[in-house]
Amino acid sequence: MSSTSNFAFYPQDVAEPATDERHVALSYLDDAWTEALRDGLDEDSLVQAALFSALRTLVETYGEEPSAKYVESLATRVRAGEYTLIGQRQ
């Protein structure tokens, strides 16, 4: 895959039916996250490990330059509230 359009994952997509593969994947990750917290892992450590793992896989799958362009777009999306849960906006 070489298209950065495959990177798109917007919060409204999570609300789609559970048959959406991304929704199912997010459920798996949420379950693993909860289990790791129950086991006493520090949430900051989980965040760092998850980001590293995701970025490593992006680079492996799409290459360095397309991955870098995608990561550059994240700052704007974070500021726009795309990753903020309703009621938690600061």
Image (tube, helix red, strand yellow):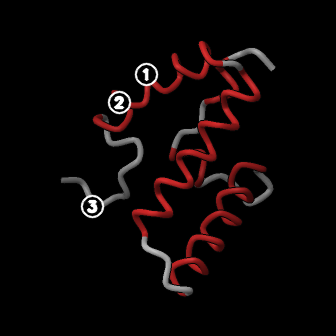
In the rendered structure, are the residues bearing label 2 and label 1 in contact, judged by CB atoms less than 8 Å apart? Answer: yes
Residue picked out by circle 1: 72
Q: Secondary structure at mark 2?
A: helix
Q: Residue furthest left?
A: 90
Q: What residue is at 35 percent from the left and 38 percent from the top?
A: 78
Query: Disc 3 to disc 1, how far (Cα)?
Result: 24 Å
Q: Amino acid at mark 3?
A: Gln
Checking the image for residue 23, the label placed there is none
> In the figure, is residue 62 to the left or right of 9?
right
- The percent coordinates of residue 46 (x first, y second) are 50, 63
- The percent coordinates of residue 19 (x first, y second) are 80, 56
Q: Secondary structure at mark 1?
A: helix
> In the figure, is residue 16 to the left or right of 79?
right
- Label located before the other in sequence (3 or 1): 1
Looking at the picture, tell me which residue is in the foreground, 40 or 27. 40
In the rendered structure, are the residues bearing label 3 and label 1 in contact, judged by CB atoms less than 8 Å apart? Answer: no
Residue picked out by circle 2: 75
10 Å crowding of disc 1: few (<14), some (14-19), many (20+): few
Query: Disc 2 to disc 3, how far (Cα)?
Result: 18 Å
10 Å crowding of disc 2: few (<14), some (14-19), many (20+): few
- Label located before the other in sequence (2 or 3): 2
Q: Amino acid at mark 1?
A: Glu
* Residue 87, quarter of the rendered image: bottom left
Q: What residue is at 24 percent from the left and 54 percent from the top?
A: 89
Residue picked out by circle 3: 88
Indicate whether 88 appears above or below 58.
below
- The percent coordinates of residue 18 (x first, y second) are 74, 60
Q: Amino acid at mark 2?
A: Ala
The N terminus appears in which quarter of the rendering?
top right
Looking at the picture, tell me which residue is in the foreground, 4 or 86. 4
In the rendered structure, are the residues bearing label 2 and label 3 in contact, judged by CB atoms less than 8 Å apart? Answer: no
